Image (cartoon, grey):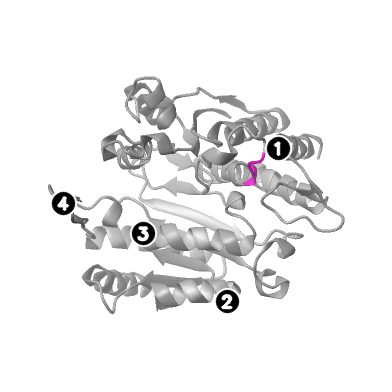
Amino acid sequence: MKATIAILPGDGIGPEVTKAAIGVVQAVANRFGHTFDLPIYKIGGAALDAGESPLPKATLDGCLGANAIFLGAVGNPKFDGEPPNRRPEAAILELRRALGTFANLRPARAWPGLEGCSALKSEIIRDVDLLVVRELTGGLYYGEPRGLAPDGRSAFNTMRYSVEEIERIAVVAFESARVRQQRVTSVDKANVLETSRLWRKVVTEVGARYSDVELNSEYVDACALLIASEPSRYDVLLTENLFGDILSDESGAIVGSLGLLPSASLGGTVGLFEPVHGSAPDLAGLNKANPIGAIGSVAMLLRHGLKLETEAVAVEQAIAMVLSAGSRTDDLASTPGTSTVGCTEMASAITLNLSTN
């Protein structure tokens, strides 16, 4: 296969984990006989530092012309005092909107050997394998009107969802459940929010079309509690933008580290693939970032973006084998028989395993 993957290193630890991801992409190309063009573009704080907008036109054009997009991380606290459209994070919202990627898939599973890295007991997380399906282009993050009152003493945001927006993300969740454990849990706040009442109604109607998939609905506060106490009860979690952002981060803590989590943003013209973790500027340049979320995002890119399932499985197997051999980054608790390695060393071990097995 010949394909173009737009590379957006971004900010903080983004360039470090992106370097790891590129190494894995190149190893896949060499092993399976593919040709991948990997043009690199500025985004976020890196673009602002270069005197450009958070999402330069050249970057957007490059993304729209690619077969898939890999993003490292975006965010730099030095821009916190800037207007919203001049902050690094504005690039992500604009890019998602331009791509039309309304469905965000965030898997979280307990990798064998990492049970001791979780704050929960090993027996609680051993069988955890859940998928958060998050609506990505609606809700509070995009709703209008929004703003700060002229006197600076109040602010407002708007949560808005249409039947069409809810229906299309529900279909993604039910189709995902069909190839997993056939269970969907829809998460809302229907006892308080009108948007959640509409959400529950539409999801129930979509669920009626999937007789082979079990549907349950939970309030978001109850779900947050149960993820932390009975995470293996869940298969596919379906929820709106804000709730999905929070719950998927919580699932990262459960399986051991946010640095383990990959993601895929789908549904539009081109898929966007990125680790769930942020830019972590305090770790930038220290070789302490965990590249597994980024490398797992490469696996999702291969599976969902390029339809290369065999190659995706090979990447996931390489991650599992290196973890089973005892390599751990700083964010993962070391136990007897394991060794702490840096971002570069972890990435090299996974790439080598992928190249030689």
Residue type, mark 3 in image: Leu
Q: CA distance from mark 3 to mark 1?
A: 31 Å
Instruction: Find disc 3 in the rendering and name its residue.
Output: 242
- Residue 289 belongs to the span the image colors magenta: yes
- How crowded pointer 1 is (Cα within 10 Å; few <14, some 14-19, many 20+) is rated as many
Name the one closer to the observer, 322 or 266: 322
Tell me residue 331's x, y (percent): 66, 51
Instruction: Find disc 4 in the rendering and name its residue.
Output: 145
Instruction: Find disc 1 in the rendering and name its residue.
Output: 347
Name the one closer to the observer, 3 or 355: 355
Residue type, mark 4 in image: Pro
Q: Main secondary structure of the magenta part?
A: loop
Which quadrant of the structure image shows residue 27?
top right
The magenta stretch is 288-292
Does 326 sit above or below residue 178?
above
Tell me residue 257's x, y (percent): 62, 55
- Residue 1 belongs to the span the image colors magenta: no
Give the label, 1 or 4, closer to the camera.
4
Nearest to N terminus: mark 3 or mark 1: 3
Instruction: Find disc 2 in the rendering and name its residue.
Output: 229
Nearest to N terminus: mark 2 or mark 1: 2
